[in-house]
């Protein structure tokens, strides 16, 4: 890869990430709703543009030029799942009457919020 600045389109980054994962051209085409021949041609153009000869070079280019947003998404999904799990565990320790009381308090809170005026009257 040359030392000059390279611009990669979002599509090129998307393809590079999939190529680096070892997915076949047919599978990538299926995921993206394209023809396999188009994916093959794009792979060849990207390899020529970035001077990629090996899978190691491809993975290195992906790390440098096409970050992996799925990792952040996976972390946030995992965090949300853990949060939900801890909520459900604390809820499962409550008695049915305590759960009913919590639901009633939540319902009253929503009703009170709905009755509040959206703007305050201006004082003179």
Image (tube, grey):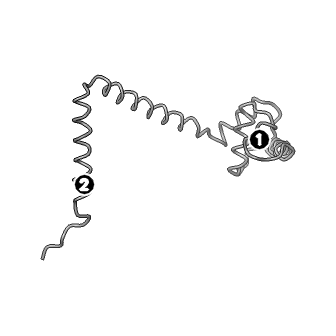
**Horizontal side, residue 11 vs residue 41: left or right:** left
Outermost residue to the bottom: 124
Outermost residue to the top: 93
Q: Give residue 88's position: percent from left, percent from top.
A: 36, 28
Q: Please tell me which residue is depicted at 27% across the width and 50% down the height of the picture.
A: 110
Q: Give residue 96's position: percent from left, percent from top.
A: 26, 27
Q: Give residue 46's position: percent from left, percent from top.
A: 80, 44
Q: Neighbour class for label 1 at 10 Å: few (<14), some, many (≥20)?
A: few
Q: Quadrant of residue 115?
A: bottom left
> What residue sits right under mark 2 in the picture?
113
Q: Please tell me which residue is depicted at 40% across the width and 28% down the height of the picture.
A: 85
Query: Which image quarter holds the C terminus?
Result: bottom left
Q: Nearer the viewer, residue 123 or 30?
A: 30
Q: Quadrant of residue 100?
A: top left
Q: Please tell me which residue is depicted at 45% across the width and 31% down the height of the picture.
A: 81
**Horizontal side, residue 71 vs residue 97: left or right:** right
Q: Nearer the viewer, residue 84 or 59?
A: 84
> What residue sits right under mark 1 in the picture?
30
- Viewer-nearest of discs 2 and 1: 2
First reached walking from the N terminus: tag 2 or tag 1: 1
Q: Please tell me which residue is depicted at 32% across the width and 24% down the height of the picture.
A: 92
Above or below residue 55? Residue 12 is: below
Above or below residue 82? Residue 109 is: below
């Amino acid at each position: 890869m040359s030392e000059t600045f390279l611009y990669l389109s979002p599509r090129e980054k998307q393809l590079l990430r999939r190529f680096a994962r070892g997915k076949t051209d047919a599978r990538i085409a299926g995921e993206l709703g394209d023809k396999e021949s188009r994916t093959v041609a794009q792979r060849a153009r990207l390899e020529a543009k970035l001077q990629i000869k090996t899978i190691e070079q491809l993975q290195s280019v992906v790390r440098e030029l096409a970050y992996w947003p799925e990792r952040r998404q996976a972390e946030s999904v995992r965090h949300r799942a853990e949060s939900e799990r801890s909520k459900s565990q604390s809820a499962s320790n409550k008695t049915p009457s305590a759960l009913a009381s919590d639901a009633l308090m939540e319902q009253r809170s929503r009703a009170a919020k709905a009755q509040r005026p959206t703007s305050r009257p201006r004082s003179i």
